[in-house]
Image: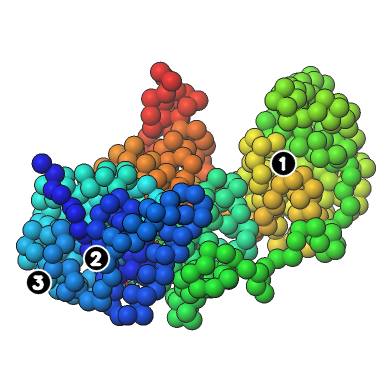
Amino acid sequence: MARDFSTVGVVGLGTMGAGIVEVFARNGIDVVAVEISEPALERGRVTLTGSTDRAVAKGKLAAADRDALHERVHFAVGLDALHSVDLVIEAVPEHLDLKQRIFAELDRVCRPETILATNTSSLSVTEISVATSRPNQVIGIHFFNPAPVMKLVEVVRTVVTSPEVVADVEALCARLGKVDVTINDRAGFIANALLFGYLNHAVGMFESHYATREDIDAAMKLGCGLPMGPLALMDLIGLDTAYEILDTMYRRGGRDRRHAPVPLLKQMVTAGLLGRKSGRGFYTYERPGSPKVVPDETTPLATDTALADGARAITKVGVVGSGTMATGIIEVFAKAGYEVVSVTRGVEKSATVCEAVKTSLNKGVVRGKLAEDDRDAALGRITWSATLDHLADVDLVVEAVIEELSVKKALFASLDEICKPGVVLATTTSSLPVIDVAMATQRPADVVGLHFFNPAPVMPLVEVVRTIRTSPETTATARAVCAALGKTGVVCGDRSGFIVNALLFPYLNDAVKMLEASYSTADDIDHAMKLGCGYPMGPFELLDVVGLDVSLAIQRELYLELREPGFAPAPLLEHLVTAGYLGRKTRRGFRDHSHR
Ligand SMILES: NC(=O)c1ccc[n+]([C@@H]2O[C@H](COP(=O)([O-])OP(=O)(O)OC[C@H]3O[C@@H](n4cnc5c(N)ncnc54)[C@H](O)[C@@H]3O)[C@@H](O)[C@H]2O)c1
């Protein structure tokens, strides 16, 4: 029979500990909540009260239940208060020596049968366990931030954790309404091993002024549907905690340079910029502990002032190409009121594109999202052409032809001859260097990347890629156009993968490597990212949707340009592509889709 946990102890009431106390008390379990000092205890109490009051205000918790919850929590300074609990969860700062000291002390204070658990994110549970005389009763119970909200718990067993203890803790997780994945003791477990390389990379982008904090965060939220951007997430985790996790993962996880904390992180921690908990990190918050971001000296002005930055007026737009992206982009511009000249390589192709745009607009009408008049007006604004000469008087050209550098360069050289002075020339390339295309013209200052996402009419993000030759006016124009299209334009440098793909694909590749190493299953890895980090899809679900061949090609480009050893494509990904398992489109990728 599963062990009865009627009283548990929580040590450390910071970002995680206070939330863990709430999880237990909400589920009818008595909690002894311990801190190192009276002021720290008071902070923990305030966090718990704040969180439960917010839950009541949102109607998620009845006032009477909140009061009962608080009655179940007994606050105390010092570990001695834990003498009769059934389980202790430690959530003190991420330092091995501190955790070992606490476990040695817990071993002395607690009853012999008490289970001792750590909430560590990256330290070795095994090393922590050997500070006690009962390593078989030591286990990792890794909650996610915020603990009351996130459904996942990683249960970490060491080589000596007793199977009964694992089973008891798994049953406890179920009682708490959590989904657990049980794994072995490896740096970063599942979720953090996949998350922290990405977070560190994003900090590196910010540090090198590759893009602003707002643009990096918007790119990942809008481009991948993540609940928050990486820099906002760093602020939530706490920069001191994130630094320690990265540092430990670097040392324990094979000295992967991608885990070596970006120097800016250390500087921010030293300067006391710890994120939400100190009121300032990458963003500035209303007050310490508040989730509300307030403007500071680097907050950008509203986009509608972009015109004041020298953006050119755009009324007529040329779109070159006849594929999925071109079709979507024509629709987007026409719906937003621009006059559009569509240029394809032949009358037949034009007819096909025209049909595709009509079909898509009609769908909008059927779904009640577009009025018939607006559909007709949008179609009336489009001219269909099979010759580039019709682009002589447009203000902006968006190129969306095949992803081949020679073709794009030849096209830009022609545009250079045909288009009027002052036109903005944009490429939608997702993987080629924009500067190569720009240098095929005599006016590289007017060339910019406009990386739309598929399907263009739906996806709210556009990456505006400026090369070292792009003029500020061209960038401002591109950004103003995005705003006029109702999209968020994020500005970034001209590097492989821009923001989204450069941050997304190495993470997907890492997930494949984790599967290949048999650390966990595709299902558990997908669960971990969805339930622990709030991702809309797990990495294997996403790889099967995107296509394994496409993913491999992007990963190869990143590896070749950045020469980062950690970006080397996972052999398993290469093998699946060679075997023709490309994902949903071939009915088989990481999963078999033939029966769905
Ligand atoms: N922050 C996250 O998003 C996150 C997520 C999952 C796991 N974790 C892990 O949880 C643990 C705690 O991280 P955090 O972010 O909550 O840290 P934190 O700095 O917010 O809180 C740590 C708390 O421990 C207290 N403390 C320090 N020494 C103590 C002692 N000797 N006795 C009792 N209390 C003591 C501190 O006063 C502080 O309140 C770490 O192991 C971390 O890796 C963090």
Question: What amino acid type should be assigned to the residue bearing mark 3?
Answer: Arg
**Sequence-first disc among 1 and 2:** 2
Bin the neighbour count of mark 3 within 10 Å (Cα to Cα): few under 14, some 14-19, many 20 and up.
some
Q: Which callout, 2 or 3, points at the residue further toward the start of the chain?
A: 2
3D distance between C-alphas at marks 1 and 2 = 66 Å
User: Please, what secondary structure does the residue beneath circle 3 have?
Assistant: helix
Are circles 3 and 1 on residues that touch, CB within 8 Å? no
On screen, residue 518 versus residue 586, left or right, reads left
Disc with the residue nearer the chain's start (3 vs 1): 3
Which of the two marks, 1 or 2, is nearer to us in this view? 2
Residue 265 as seen in the image, left or right of residue 44:
right
Q: Which residue is mark 2?
A: 32
Find residue 356 and report its image quarter: top right
Please give the residue where the numbered disc 3 appears in the rendered image: 108
Report which residue position mark 1 lands on: 408
Residue 219 lies, with reference to residue 347, above or below; the image says below
* Horizontal and vertical percent position of residue 357: 76, 26
User: How much space separates mark 3 and mark 1, taking CA atoms?
Assistant: 71 Å
The residue mark sitting in front, 2 or 3, is 2
Left or right position of 95 against 363: left
> Where residue 52 sits in the image (x, y, percent)?
42, 59
Type of amino acid under label 1: Lys
Nearest the camera: 583 or 3? 3
Image coordinates of residue 427 in percent, x first then y, are 72, 45
